[in-house]
Image (tube, grey):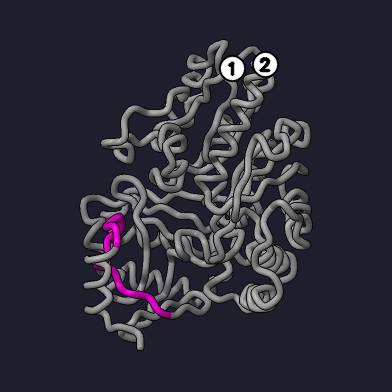
Amino acid sequence: MTPNQDELRALYAEYMVPAYNFSAPIMVRGEGSRLWDIEGKRYLDFTTGISVCSLGHCHPGVVKAIQEQSATLMHCSNVFCNANGPRLAKKLSEHGIGGKVFFANSGAEANEGLIKTARLWGSQHGEKTDIIVFHTSFHGRTLATLAATGQPIFRNGMAPDMPGFTTVEYNNLQAVKDAVTSKTCAILLEPLQAEGGVFPATQEFMTGLRQLCDEKEMLLLFDEVQTGMGRTGTFFAFQHFGIKPDGFSTAKAIGNGIPLACFQLRKDLADLYKPGLTHGSTFGGTPLATAAGLAVIEAFETEGVLANANQQSEYLFQKLRALQQKHPAIKDIRGMGLLIGIQLDEALADTVAKCRENGLLVLTAGKGVMRLLPSLKVTTEEVDEAIAIIDKALP
């Protein structure tokens, strides 16, 4: 028998590390854009597990793939190849930069792979070791990815930082140029900073970074952990800018709820890795996880996911701008696709809480920003429902 809400909270308090706020509802079921908590309350979910369940909760194709694969083979170690990994890598390469893929479990691990790639490459090009990163960025919670994260608050009490990272202002090309030294091997950034406050890169900035890396013989690396897999309206966010990185990470939405991540590299960069020596992952790219990934790609290719995401993005931005005219608390609306930030004044915490009370789940990002991450298959009716709740929640 499942414990009740009070019993679960007591178990959490006694046995779990309090890294999360457990005052939030206890969720027990999901379907499409909906979640239900342990008390039976239904919510419209505009968080999607922080951009993980981008096809909606319990997508039928993904569920079927997981069920069938779990009855056949879940894990066999990466000492052996499985039948799903190479096929998923091919699909991701075709939708990405035509590169080679390494599978991992989480976005932080995928970004660690990018950092290792930069240093492996730099060791062969004049012992270059340093990576330029950006203020208000977020790349993960391992020590290396924290050192690359331009928000010191996440590193409190964890000094000393891993060396080799230079942090500069986002969207400031001159600041990047000024930071380049003979030791710089790479530039690492999010095409749209999600956790930092939903700040998109400018076209001038992205084009300039590509040109600078080509001129100075550096790698351009993108963190697409949250922006990848259709979240911004293209398969990967860098595709909005007409440039290609030398490598990029992605995670979260690849498995639509099953832990799966990867980094993809230019094919010549993949040769930096030597079997059994340079990198590895016990659970990266298991038969189960990559079966889910293949089902996600199939949904993108057959269900009009990107077309719907772009259509609903336009509609949602239109509705939010109408709200802005009505509510002075809304200072700005920004984002790409279905990754949207609403800059509020000091009313943020109350607004988020009121949204939840009225059945809408939203997130925060950075200072004073309410973040919306609906399913890429969200409907017009669900957008209208969310807008009505936000309207009611705003002061």
In the structure shown, which secondary structural element does the residue marked by tag 1 occupy?
loop
Task: Say which mark, if any, is on residue 265.
Answer: none
From the viewer's perspective, is residue 342 above or below residue 295? above
| x 64%, y 78%: residue | 67
Question: Can residue 314 be seen here?
Answer: no
Tell me if I can see residue 231 in this picture.
Answer: yes
Q: Three-letter amino acid code at disc 2?
A: His
Quarter residue 24 falls in = bottom left
Q: Nearer the viewer, residue 301 or 329?
A: 301
Q: Name the residue rendered at 40%, 79% in the picture.
A: 28
* Residue 20 inside the magenta-drawn segment: yes
- x and y percentages locating residue 257 in the rendered image: 54, 66
Q: Which residue is mark 2?
A: 125
Magenta-tinted stretch: 16-28
Residue 128's mark?
1
Q: Is residue 103 magenta?
A: no
Q: Which residue is pictured at 46% across the width and 25% down the height?
A: 165
Q: Amino acid at mark 1?
A: Lys
- Dividing the picture into quadrants, the one containing residue 296 is bottom right
* Residue 60 vertical placement versus 141 (above, below): below
Magenta stretch, overall SS: loop
- Looking at the picture, tell me which residue is in the foreground, 29 or 12: 12
The picture places residue 353, in percent across and down from the top left corner, at 25, 66
Query: How far is disc 2 from disc 1 in space, using C-alphas?
Result: 6 Å
Image height of 11 relative to 206, above or below: below
Classify mark 2: residues with Cα within 10 Å, few (<14), some (14-19) or many (20+). Answer: some
Residue at 47% across, 61% down: 373
Q: Where is 138 relative to 95, above or below?
A: above
Camera-nearest residue between 370 and 35 = 35
Q: How many marks?
A: 2
* Pointers 2 and 1 in contact (C-beta within 8 Å): yes
| Residue 34, x across and y down, in percent | 45, 77
